[in-house]
Amino acid sequence: MLRKVIMMFVMVGLLSFIYANAVKAAEAEMPKQAEMPKQDDMQKQIDAIKAAIPKFAIPMREVGDRFQDMYSAAKGGNWGLAAYMSKYMNGAMNPARLTKPAEYPAWENFYKNTFDPVNKAIMAQDFKAFDKEYKAVIKNCNECHAGMGYGFVKVHMQKTASDLGIDYSVKSKATDVPK
């Protein structure tokens, strides 16, 4: 019994020693208030990171390529690829939430409302409806570009897909795209 009590005191002492040294080491690693970055410096760092993130133009290039590839996929009966292109076309614009917060709602409204009939046609796997809605979206894109001062950016249907390394004729369902 005495042996157990002595062993317990030794263990408690050892754990106390380890804890005290761990606390001292952690305190030594923490920067002192004077060493902490100032609010202005931190804001400059945040602004520098935001400046490195793509605004609208770079993600729009991806949007354009995916939009064109979507048509080739639907035409080839690759509805899974068409749905995939739509999903990631929208996702490509996520950086604009941070870098262009005033303009991002226009994209969000476009994708949720104007582009919705295209997505519905993809889910229905109805090429006739898809073709009609896709062409209507092109007209809307050009009107939006002009309204935002980019009338020189005119979307038209390409004769071939943007990415020629994809087989657009693979038969798939729109629901094949993982969530």
Image: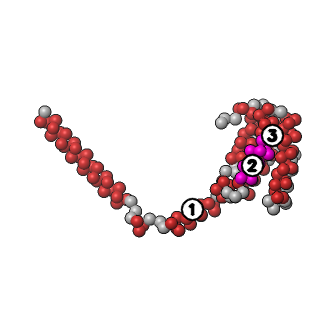
Residue 160 image offset from top left, x and y in percent: 84, 45
Which numbered mark, 2 or 1, is in the foreground of this view? 2
Where 61 sits versus 120, above or below? below
Q: Residues within 10 Å of mark 3 (few under 14, many from 20)?
A: some
Say which mark, if any, is on residue 117: 3
Q: Which residues are magenta?
A: 105-118
Which residue is at a point 83% across and 33% down the rendered structure image? 126
Tell me if I can see residue 55 in this picture.
no
Dot 1 amino acid type: Ile
First of labels 3, 1 by sequence position:
1
Q: Residue 109 got which mark?
A: 2
The colour scheme used here is: secondary structure
Labels 2 and 3: the sequence-earlier one = 2
Q: Which mark is residue 121?
A: none
Q: Give the image location of residue 150, x and y in percent.
A: 81, 60
Instruction: Give amino acid for label 2.
Output: Asn
Task: Tell me the residue at 31%/52% (across/down).
Answer: 22
Is residue 113 on the magenta stretch? yes
Could you tell whether 172 is left or right of 13 in the image?
Answer: right
- Res. 11 image quadrant: top left
Sort mark 1 into few (<14), some (14-19) or many (20+) by Cα contacts within 10 Å.
few
Task: Kindly state the secondary structure of the residue where label 1 is placed.
Answer: helix
Q: Is residue 25 visible?
A: yes
Question: Closer to the camera, 154 or 143?
Answer: 143
Label 1, on which residue? 46
Q: Earlier in the sequence, mark 2 or mark 1?
A: 1
Looking at the rendered structure, the kind of residue marked 3 is: Pro
Q: Which element is circle 3 on?
A: helix
- Quadrant containing the N terminus in the rendered view: top left
